[in-house]
Each structure stands twice: as structure tokens, then as C-alpha cells.
Amino acid sequence: MLELKEVKKVYNSFTLDVSLNVPNGQIVGLVGANGAGKSTTFKSILHLIRPRSGSIELFGTETMGRDLTKKERERLGVVLSDSGFFIYLTASDIMMVQQAMYPSFEKDRFLKLCRELEIPLDKQIKDFSTGMKAKLKVAAALCHKADLLILDEPTAGLDVIARDTVLDLLRDYLDEREDASILISSHISSDLESICDSFYMIHNGSIIFHEDTDVLLSEYAVLKVTDQQYNDLDKKYIIRVRKENFGWKCLTHMKRFYAENYPDAVFENGGIDDLVLMMVKGEVL
């Protein structure tokens, strides 16, 4: 569905250098701190900025060095964190714009989503709450049979109930369109853990980690050990370490090995929050 190979973009002191792959029928997460390069990656895919080099293959066709075709754009559903609709439009206006832009726009689906997400049709966007604006962007992205959804922080500004509703909509979308795919970013790790098949971690413009979500949740863990335990620890399966007041935190992808051989160690199951902290703030042995 989408493949980036060594896509590079330089901004003053910041350099993006990213390779990633989004297979058909999967939800792939992109995580990282603010300024890590998530939005720059998304804008490179959409050709809103021009990378300096590399390869971007979209729907099986190389797109680097040219504008996306009308057909390619029609096959994309997009939510960007730092952009939105003209504030003096209403949801009804957006519906008419979408109908004009997309031959496959589903008016009935859009109206249904507006009801489910409690989006008023005749209220100007300037009077929407932050959460309401976010829900409108998601509704618009889901209503023209897109093959690939590019979603940059789609749940930002939503409360826990609204986030769960939006995530259910994304799951339902892939259930209906088995060959469609989603690339999504979020600061809320539980969102990604609950819907993504795999995810990439970006830091300082580069991908530093890629793993299937089920492997992360089953095989990764953070060990908490004293200084003495750390000295005695077999570190061949330790990815990162971090010094703490009590001793050490150690990130591993071989939880079973350490559970069997070091029963006195304290284990925390690996999660995206743990991974981000350890990969960014931890040290490589």
C-alpha cells in the first residue's frame, strides 16, 4: 500500500531520514515525541513538502519527484494535526465540497457519522470545540472509500469516550474494506496498542524501532533490578538501560529468558510508553 525508502528532508538543523512500510489491510502506528518527525513524514507522503531524496511508493507506483494524480489523491483519506477546514464553513458545506471532490463520496455515511459523533450540520466550524473539529476531520476522511488513511493525531482533543468511538470507526472501516490500510500517529499509546498491527518509532527524524504490536505486548518487558542484580545480569538480550535511584531499568525483548533465569527481578510488561521512554532516554550497552 505504501513504502518509504530512505526518504530525506533537511530543515536547518533537523534532518528527516525515514524508511517504513504499510502493508495492505493493516493499521500501522507511528510514534515519537513532539518534533520527532511524524508530521514531516506524513507531509512527505502527501507531497505537501518535497523530500530531497529517497523513494515513496504509493499504491504500487513511485511518486517521488512528481505531484500526486487526481486518482491517487481520491484514494487517500487524510487527517493532519496542524490543518483543518475553513472556519466559516459548516459540516453541510464540507459535505458539498466532498461531493464535488470525490466521485465515490458517501453522503449517507457522512450524515450517519455526524449523528454518531454529535457533529452539528449547520454550525460554523469557528464555533466548534477542539474535539468537535477533530471528529469532523475523521468523518470527512472516512466517507469517500479511501484505500489508505493517513491520520496524524486524529484523536487529539477528544475525551476518552469520543476517542473510543473514533477508534471503533477505524476498526469497522477495515472490516468493511479488507484491503484498505491505515497509517496513524498518536500521543496516546493505549490508542495505538488497541488498534495497530505494528508500529514504528521515530526519534530525531529517524526510525529507531519497528515491531509487531502483539510481539511487543507479549515478549517485551522492563526489568527493575538493584545494582548488585544488574552486575550479575546476563545482558545479551538487553536493548536499553537506564540508571534509577533503586538501581537500573532494563528493556528486553526476551521477557521469558529473564523471568526463568532471574526470578527475583521485578518485571513490567512492555508497552509503547515504556518503549518510548527507554528507547529515547535509555543507553545502549
Image (spheres, helix red, strand yellow):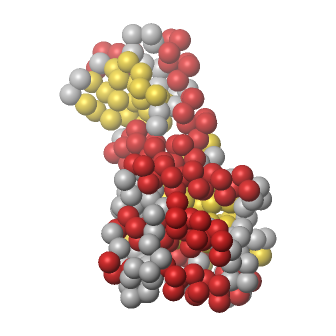
Query: Which sits in the foreground, 91 or 266?
Result: 91
> Residue 181's spot in the image, x, y percent?
68, 60
Query: Which sits in the foreground, 118 or 5?
Result: 118
Tell me how many marks there are.
0
Is residue 63 in view from this perspective?
A: no
> Residue 84's spot in the image, x, y percent?
44, 78
Left or right side of 162 for 30 = right
Left or right side of 267 for 174 = right
Q: Quadrant of residue 18?
A: bottom right
Residue at left 27%, top 24%? 247
Residue at left 40%, top 79%? 123
- State the quadrant of the N terminus: bottom right
> Residue 207's spot in the image, x, y percent?
52, 57
Left or right side of 28 for 271 = left
Is residue 250 in view from this perspective?
A: yes
> Residue 97's spot in the image, x, y percent?
58, 87
From what the image shows, is residue 97 above or below residue 106? below
- State the quadrant of the C terminus: top left
Residue at left 48%, top 61%? 117
Residue at left 45%, top 64%? 118
